[in-house]
Image (cartoon, rainbow, N blue to C red):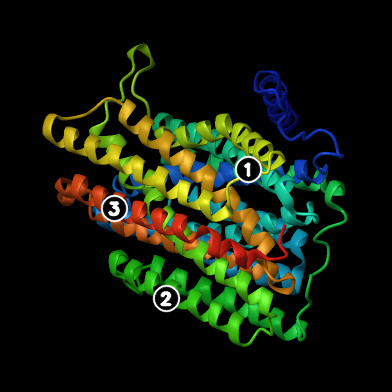
Amino acid sequence: MPIKAWRFVVIVRERFSPFLKTSLPTMNAPVKHPPGLMTLFFTEMWERMSYYGMRALLVLFMVDQVQGAKLSDAQATAVYGLYTALVYVMALPGGWVGDRLLGMKRAVWWGGVVIALGHITLGIERPEAFYIGLVIVAVGSGLLKSNMSSMVAQLYPEGGARRDAGYTLFYMGINIGAFIGMILCPWLAQRFGWRWGFSAAAVGMVLGLVQFHLTKHRIAHIGVQPEHPAAHMRRDKLLLILSIAAIGVLTALCATGVIVIDPVSLAKATATIISCLAAAFFAWAFLLAGLTSDEKKRMVLVVVLFGASALFFAGFEQAGSSFSLFAERYTIRTVGSLGTIPAGQFQSLNSLMVIALAPVVAMLWSRLARRKAEPLMITKFAWGLFALALGFVVAAFAAQKALATGPVLPTWLISIYLLHTLGELFLSPIGLSAVSKLAPERLAGQTMGIWFLGSSLGNILAGLLAGEVTGDASAQMPHIFMQVVYLAGATGVLLLILSRPLSRLMKGVS
């Protein structure tokens, strides 16, 4: 499977090139892209298969059965937001562990092992196992994800458009895995039961670990040792073990009902904590980390990217919450002899579109760079927010029509996913590449963790937003969706206005 999937990417390059009178970045020749990209591509592909396959089931499962009773839409989407936020929150300590204690390569390996154990736990037919499994998967994902992205950057020490193209192709691998997971897991859940869908995600992560081990020689030169070893290694490892134990005890107490938590209130409090954590990191970086003047200027850009990312993902992540419930309740899903399409499979549209469009976008950036006409990085972010806003215009009209006349055609959701996918390609892989360039060398993993922390804040805000437009609040969908349009559009205009002044802060970065 991995070799066939990799050949698919190469075939896409070869088929597109004659018609576009240019060539997409070559990935089967070391002179174009390093062979280690293949290892990271497929490891991330299988990890994303497990993550997105399971994520496609979460909200639908929780409103169907948890602890023998349905959760309300607001509670289920809040839990969804908390979980997806925790995945990205854990990227910050995960980056620290890779930077200081384990090295990126071992951090990726052990992160994958923890993720697999979490998915196995989710497959256990016990209510408490569900919540414990979510936390285990989130911890492992945080450890793997930030270090994996930083390793991609190390494959391209020269930076430039080649690195941007490499990140975009890496992002394509993410979405191949996500597509497989979001097709397979919902189908298994509908056909055989929820636990089959969750268990399939564990198989995906194990395949990723096998692939990583068999091809690790391709990345033998990167991520082996900590980039900046901790001054007190033994003490810091003990602190890490105690922190993991504390998380385990707290999770067990909550899962068994000893500590009772209101998901919505906890989500609001967590959003505040994440914002304070990000502010504390940036304050430390600017005031106490000993950064040079140029490094501080670049960190200003990281702050801007953090805010734009949080806003984008607050809207984009409606895919797994309010849009998933919209697919379940307000979309015509019966297709002739094929029967009823599982609602969770609609989320695979995003990944399918990324698979189709990522090579084209990678080619676009490379072609524009050769002509010295490539848009500024901040401009690309503005385009991403404009695409998000247009998607919510469509969502507002779809919601208005569904509330007035009943279930609507799936073309509405397809249009939303198309616009949001374009926004994602303009913003997310470019953000990954930009943060890898802007981060001070000694804070590389932690700064990448902050980038994911922005996604974390966006995810938890997405869960809270979904609770405002589902269930008894469904009548508010058109109005609140238009509020997202105004906010995303205005932020995009502001970024366009400031794009040149902000870009001057990237002095010395290629």
Using the image as rendered, state which of residue 505 and residue 133 is in the foreground: 505
Secondary structure type for disc 1: loop
Q: On residue 486, which mark appears?
A: 3
Secondary structure type for disc 2: helix
Question: Given the image, on which type of amino acid does mark 3 rest?
Answer: Tyr
**C-beta proximity under 8 Å, tags 2 and 1:** no
Q: On residue 373, which mark appears?
A: 1
Measured as percent of width and height from the top left, residue 364 is found at 62, 36
Which badge, 3 or 2, is on the more N-terminal residue? Answer: 2
Which badge, 3 or 1, is on the more N-terminal residue? Answer: 1
Q: On residue 273, which mark appears?
A: 2
Which badge, 2 or 1, is on the more N-terminal residue? Answer: 2
Q: Nearer the viewer, mark 3 or mark 1?
A: 1
**C-beta proximity under 8 Å, tags 3 and 2:** no
Q: CA distance from mark 3 to mark 1?
A: 29 Å
Q: Quadrant of residue 97?
A: bottom right
Label 3: few (<14), some (14–19) or many (≥20) C-alpha neighbours in 10 Å = some
Left or right of 298 in this view: 312: left
Using the image as rendered, state which of residue 252 and residue 173 is in the foreground: 173
Q: CA distance from mark 2 to mark 1?
A: 41 Å
